[in-house]
Image (cartoon, rainbow, N blue to C red):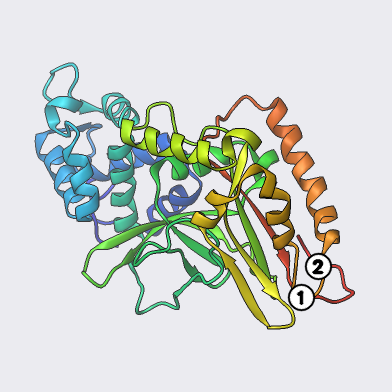
Amino acid sequence: VSTQSTGGRGLLNFKDLIFGLSLLHKGTTEDKLKFAFQLFDKDGNGYLDKIEVTALIEQIFSISDSISHRVLDHNLSFSSMDTDGDGKVSLIEFVQYCKSNETVTFALESCILSTFEGDLNSSGNQFESFSHQAAGHKGQGKGMLKQGDTIFKHFSEKEFQFYETLKEYPEIAVFFPKYYGRTRVKNPKGGYDHYIILEDLTKNVQYPCICDLKMGRQTHEPHAPIKKKIEQKTVDTLSSSRALGFRICGMRIFQVISRSYIVKDKPWGTAVRNSQMEQALKIFIGNGKRLRYEVIQGFLPKLKKIHTWFKTQTHFKFVGSSILLIYDGKDDDQDRPV
């Protein structure tokens, strides 16, 4: 594999390749930064000089326009990394600079990705739109993609960092879809769209019925822009969020008689008032023939486990997160997963 090497050789051996791919999916942020440092330390002397830092910056700006525009907002330069002014950037300086700047860290991880992983092309791979998405961004080029038993969800730095951190807490992984790292997909314009790869929770469900609940009485972050705060405060107040601590973001419910789905979108969920919530949730368990109260009995033990964990955990602060409820809409006498 021809690339910038970890030892100035201009080539990566098979061991280097396997190590790099492993870091992409299992390594910590610091591990990845150390490896990125080694990739650009062409002479292997343990420091980055101006030429090597310039090569690093050029590589970042060649990845995609969306990343380079975000990096432009930060002081990405040799002098900003060389904090002691000795004319070279040590590993410690490099890691400290990058860890204080999530955007640059993401860009560097993309550099590793572009070096070690082949590009995924949406026309050359078996991608399809995820048809069961109940909420979230679903406009042109914004919806989730499906490939096999995995979902490609558009990259969010905070969400990516959360799933990376979650590796250190395997005891709570059962509450979240399995996480398979991140990747990029070549788009029709010749650039790249970045995704995180998650388990498709509907993979073994014949007729997925899905309800997306936005949790919390306040769904904006403390440091969000003023405009975002005003928008979210308004939605929180007008919807059921402020009073009940959650609101409906979307639903898809399979109807056994018509063999079709009822779809409820975000505006509908926002308009559901406190007094209407019970009836709205009954819609979710109604299949056009009966109300499936047994579905509630399947959800309750899992919701109680989540509630118990939230009461005791101190590692995470969730703002505007969601709980996804899924059950199989096939109406028969067999037990169906929820």
Going by the image, does 273 lie left or right of 204?
Answer: left
Q: Residue at x 32, y 60 (%)?
A: 193
Q: Nearer the viewer, residue 157 or 253?
A: 253
> What is the number of the mark on residue 330?
1
- Can residue 88 be seen from the camera position used here? no
Where disc 2 sits, the SS reads loop
> What is the number of the mark on residue 321?
none
Query: Furthest-front residue in view?
Result: 275
Q: Amino acid at mark 1?
A: Lys
Q: Which residue is mark 2?
A: 336
Residue 198 location (% of width, % of height): 54, 57
Q: Residue at x 68, y 55 (%)?
A: 280
**Residue 230 figure quarter:** top left
Q: Nearer the viewer, residue 209 or 31?
A: 209
Q: Amino acid at mark 2?
A: Arg
Q: Are marks 1 and 2 in contact (CB under 8 Å)?
A: yes
Q: Residue at x 30, y 31 (%)?
A: 101
